[in-house]
Image: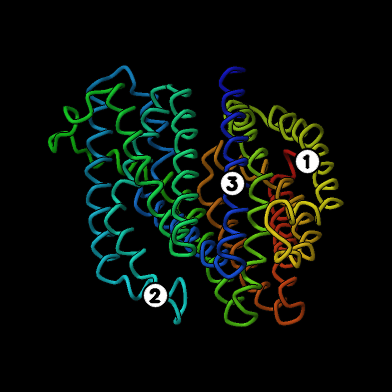
């Protein structure tokens, strides 16, 4: 566990380092307006990836690990999921290819000509779903180190692709790099899966089992609600900013969001690797309460201390990560950081939904949170301009935290 956690920490640190380098290159070569377009495409791509995999990832890990020693059951899982994903990928690719102009206008706005990005995305989309599927199977078979190495190699591929395309082609290069890098990762994941199982020998229509799809459906619902609706809400908010405040203001918010993503990665990794397994195994309210308060006593204070230092050094951080052109971002720090404190307080409670497979409660609270965020953003933007977005973010995370505290009050107190 220590070796895996250490290697995973290295992977996260590398991902953050690469993200910082990419942010600096984007700031220099495409500016705030290009940053906003990159944010829009990333949100769209996140939703599309999860739709193309039907949100099966966590379920695949679970059932692959349970049936690792049963070749026939593993064949059923691999064949059923592969055939399903192939059908979905081909359908989505066809729609995307022939409606590229529509998506260009919807994601980037009327005055852009980036439809070629969606044509290329349509061609490589099947590789996205299969890469995620292969990683989930490898993870389920207990090959944790290989999963981490895949992530490390993927991040390096992403960096090299981004640096080359952004420096050569500016904004269109940045957009193309986001689309192409995951497709290159497919070659790595396919090589890794072939070393673990005879993949093509396992794919047969006779092994297709509708019961497996039913078993995966609850995982699918939870994953799709969070990873499809969330990015679309952020996409809608960013487009609202572009139309009402200008594309540069949207770029400043995207820059603040990128900084937030870097430090939140450490907390989410600790939760996934250490706290989620503990919550899953907890058999009583007292055990769960102990895990909750262990998190609040040891992880939360360190996180708050880091954010205080980050706030004090905000001018230096913005100049280091971006450029002086991005200095208006410093005005967004206070409310973003406050919102992230509320978010981190709520994260451990939200993981309880996954640990105990509380599908309905998870979906209701997620949809409620997304709705609050969207409508409060629209209202606060009118009053506070771009700062209204981060104020709304802090407000939404506070409300979400209070809802979860009330829901889990018997365990917490």
Compute the Cα span from label 2 to label 3. Answer: 26 Å
Q: Which of marks 2 and 1 is nearer the N terminus?
A: 2
Question: Is residue 206 rendered to the left or right of residue 82?
Answer: left
Circle 3: element type = helix
Foreground mark, 1 or 3?
Answer: 3
Name the residue carrying label 2.
113
Q: Disc 2 vs disc 1: which is toward the camera?
A: 2
Residue that numbered label 3 is attached to: 19
Q: At x 54% / y 40%, what residue is drawn?
A: 354
Foreground: 285 or 262? 262
From mark 2 to mark 1, how far is it between C-alphas?
42 Å
Of callouts 2 and 3, the N-terminal one: 3
Q: Mark 1 points at which residue?
A: 303
Q: Which residue is drawn at 31% across and 42% down?
A: 130
Which residue is drawn at the image coordinates 57% and 67% (left, top)? 36
In the depicted structure, whether residue 102 falls above or below residue 118: below
Question: How far, Cα to Cα, is label 1 from label 3?
Answer: 20 Å
Where is 45 relative to 300, above or below? below
Instruction: From the viewer's perspective, tell me whether residue 161 is left or right of residue 26.
Output: left
Front residue of 272 and 258: 258
Instruction: Describe residue 178's horizontal placement relative to residue 33 as left or right.
Output: left
Q: Residue at 67% across / 57% down in the picture?
A: 322
Q: Nearer the viewer, residue 296 or 341?
A: 341
- Crowding near pointer 2: few (<14 within 10 Å), some, many (20+)? few
**Measured from the top left, where is residue 325 in percent x and y?**
70, 66
Q: Quadrant of residue 207?
A: top left
């Amino acid at each position: 566990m220590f070796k895996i956690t250490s290697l995973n920490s290295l992977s996260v640190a590398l991902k953050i380092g690469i993200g910082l380098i990419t942010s600096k290159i984007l700031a220099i070569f495409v500016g705030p307006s290009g940053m906003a377009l990159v944010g829009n495409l990333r949100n769209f791509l996140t939703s599309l990836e999860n739709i193309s995999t039907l949100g099966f990832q966590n379920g695949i890990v679970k059932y692959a690990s349970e049936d690792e020693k049963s070749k026939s059951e593993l064949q059923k899982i691999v064949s059923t999921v592969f055939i399903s994903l192939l059908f979905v990928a081909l359908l989505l690719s066809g729609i995307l290819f022939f409606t590229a102009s529509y998506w260009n206008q919807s994601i980037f706005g009327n005055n852009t000509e980036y439809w070629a990005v969606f044509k290329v995305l349509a061609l490589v989309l099947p590789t996205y779903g299969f890469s995620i599927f292969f990683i989930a199977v490898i993870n389920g078979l207990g090959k944790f180190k290989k999963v981490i190495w895949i992530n490390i190699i993927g991040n390096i591929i992403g960096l090299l692709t981004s640096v080359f395309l952004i420096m050569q082609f500016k904004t269109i290069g940045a957009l193309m790099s986001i689309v192409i890098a995951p497709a290159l990762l497919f070659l790595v994941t396919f090589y890794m899966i072939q070393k673990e199982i005879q993949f093509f020998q396992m794919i047969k229509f006779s092994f297709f089992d509708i019961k497996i799809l039913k078993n995966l459906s609850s995982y699918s619902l939870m994953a799709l609600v969070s990873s499809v609706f969330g990015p679309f809400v952020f996409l809608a908010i960013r487009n609202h900013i572009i139309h009402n405040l200008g594309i540069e203001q949207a770029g400043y918010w995207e820059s603040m969001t990128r900084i937030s993503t870097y430090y939140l990665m450490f907390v989410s990794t600790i939760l996934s690797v250490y706290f989620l397994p503990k919550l899953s195994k907890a058999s009583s309210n007292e055990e769960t309460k102990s895990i909750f308060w262990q998190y609040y006593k040891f992880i939360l204070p360190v996180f708050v201390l880091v954010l205080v230092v980050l706030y004090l050094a905000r001018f230096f951080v913005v100049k280091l990560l971006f450029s002086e052109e991005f200095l208006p971002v410093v005005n967004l720090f206070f409310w973003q950081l406050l919102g992230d404190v509320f978010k981190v307080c709520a994260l451990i409670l939200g993981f309880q939904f996954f640990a105990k497979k509380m599908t309905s409660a998870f979906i209701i609270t997620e949809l409620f949170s997304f709705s609050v965020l969207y409508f409060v953003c629209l209202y606060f933007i009118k009053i506070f301009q771009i700062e209204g977005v981060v104020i709304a973010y802090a407000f939404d995370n506070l409300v979400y935290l209070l809802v979860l505290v009330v829901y889990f009050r018997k365990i917490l107190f």
